[in-house]
Amino acid sequence: MKKLKKLAAALLSLAMTAMLAVPAFAQAGDYSITISNTNANHTYTAYQIFKGDVSGGTGDGTTGNSTYLLSNIEWGSGVQNISGLLTALKTQAGFTSLTDQSTAADVAKLLDSAADLETFLTVLNGTPGYLSSTAAGTATPGAGMTACTINLTEGGYYLVKDSLAGETPDDFVSDYIVQVLGQETMAPKGDKPTVEKKVYEESLSAATTDWGNGYNDVADYDIGDAVPFKIVASIPDMTGYNGYEFVITDTLSNGLTLAEDTLQVYVTAAKDTALDALTPLSAGTDYTLATTDIGDASFTLTFENMEENEDFTASDDNYIIVTYTATLNENAEIGLDGNPNEVDLTYSNDPNGKGKGKTPKDYVVVFTYELDGTKVDGKNTETKLKDAEFVLLNNAGTQVAKIDSNGKFDGWVNVPDGSGDAGAITYGDWTTFNQTHKVIMTSAETSGSFGISGLDEGAYLLREIKAPEGYNLIKNDQTLVIAASTGEVQNYNGTASSVLTTLTLKVGEEEPKAGNVADGTVAIEVPNNAGATLPETGGVGTTIFFVLGGVMLLGAGILLTVRIRMKATNRQ
């Protein structure tokens, strides 16, 4: 099937003989080639290779019901240095019967297969080149047009050369041999590769896409996480090419660091093929990996002479898949504009030259967020409290977030004794642990602020391990849930604000509160209440003591009076 596809892409007409009957679409003498194409970057130029007498014609001119013949074939105006062309042709397989005296008709009789026609075109367009500068006609699709027409003065066989404006347009060019015995219509045939990129988002692991579960254009991660990426490039039809070049260029932002040793390249039949069962291609043999001296790119993968490598030409080899991980690093952008990653593909697009095409860039983006806390007085939130100390735990309470000197997330580590019980770890345990792993956040003087940046969306536990002086310690962990609006996105256009539109923080059972999307921040106020104190002089407590003291004194006086009277009575 793939060989047939390649054949159709290379040639519009396979048969070229001295006396060939073909369908015609107009009366003889009215000659044109109409090319269906909406891309205004193309220019089509027709060169007459063979000319002759157009004769015959029956019926009403519809396809399959008329016959026109081209006879008395001669060289057309588009061919030069005929003796040199014959000399070059007769050394090629299929053309050894030619001599220096062979005619145009002799050559035309030999063009009875796709292979022979391809050989003829290769020699005709080769060096020194036997195609003259005399064009029989030219046409370019205009803006909004669906086709363009080359008007010709006579019938014959024409080579239609296709050229593209610009250095690396995203399209291909092809040459066609067209038999023109009337008004002919053709559509550009060929193939160009495509390239797409995805990033793995764990929360979408149950979502099925063409890429496999969980692959998306948008993801959220903690700083320090290894982020999986996947590139899928289609393998094009390379018929007619001699030295097909295929270069994947991947560009990471400053917030992502390539883990070069994780990069693998595969050839598969489908985008979502399970890669575990496949054998990776070999760097240096099947492709060349470059990570330095490549401008702003992070790496390039260059595949040279792909048309000669069976890895890429087998009938079931449809895609090149590249996988790798990159670490979200300390330079990661918090909130917008995220941490983008883009890919494009440069490819050979002219079988008769060194032309290159280039795909549009395809984008993915990785976001990360910041938790901003403020310690306040429980009765007067305008009063900010210093020296409160916190740790941030994972949702299971088994790991604690490490924090670097810039207040950024620095990975997870098991809690000091391995348990997540809020009452099992003492303040002393935390302070000792903090000497090895910085995990404690302290509210600042004046502002009462504390926090950590570089967090994935998801659920966390905020634990207060020390209250401000004179305040009660919060005994229970607070459940925090950071949520972002990224969701499942498969057609990201490179504008971060189009995919990250909302950011919220839910504290316990409270309603979620909006965060700052641009800064990537969510905020929480943590109130503390003052501890119980001894009553002041003159207070209710003092009054109680005075009352009790008075009662006791009065009782003692009554008791003393009673005893004195009893003694007096006894003396009598």
Image (cartoon, rainbow, N blue to C red):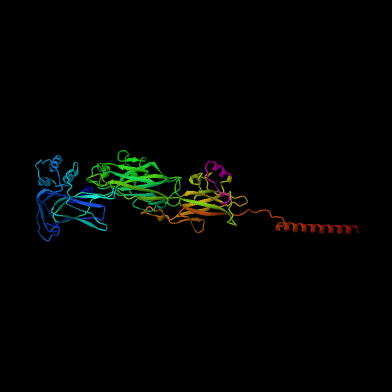
User: Relative to 472, is 8 on the left or the right?
Assistant: left
Residue 245 is left or right of residue 380, and the answer is: left
The percent position of residue 262, horizontal first and vertical second, equals: 38, 42
Residue 449 % position (x, y): 55, 51
Name the side, left or right, on which 126 lies relative to 506.
left
Q: Give residue 448's position: percent from left, percent from top.
A: 56, 51
The number of numbered badges drawn on the structure is 0
Which residue is depicted at the point 45% across and 54% down? 518
Q: Is residue 442 magenta?
A: yes
> Farthest residue toward the bottom?
60
In this rendered view, identify the residue nearer to me: 558 or 196: 196
Span colored in magenta: 428-447
Closer-to-camera residue (165/122): 165
Give 287 or 338, whichever is nearer the viewer. 338
- Residue at the top extreme of this rendering: 284
User: Is residue 323 toward the left or the right of residue 51 in the image?
Assistant: right
Location of the C terminus by quadrant is: bottom right
Task: List x then y, in percent, for residue 520.
Answer: 46, 52
**Residue extending furthest right?**
572
Q: Is residue 299 magenta?
A: no
**In this orientation, which residue lies closer to the viewer: 11 or 55?**
55
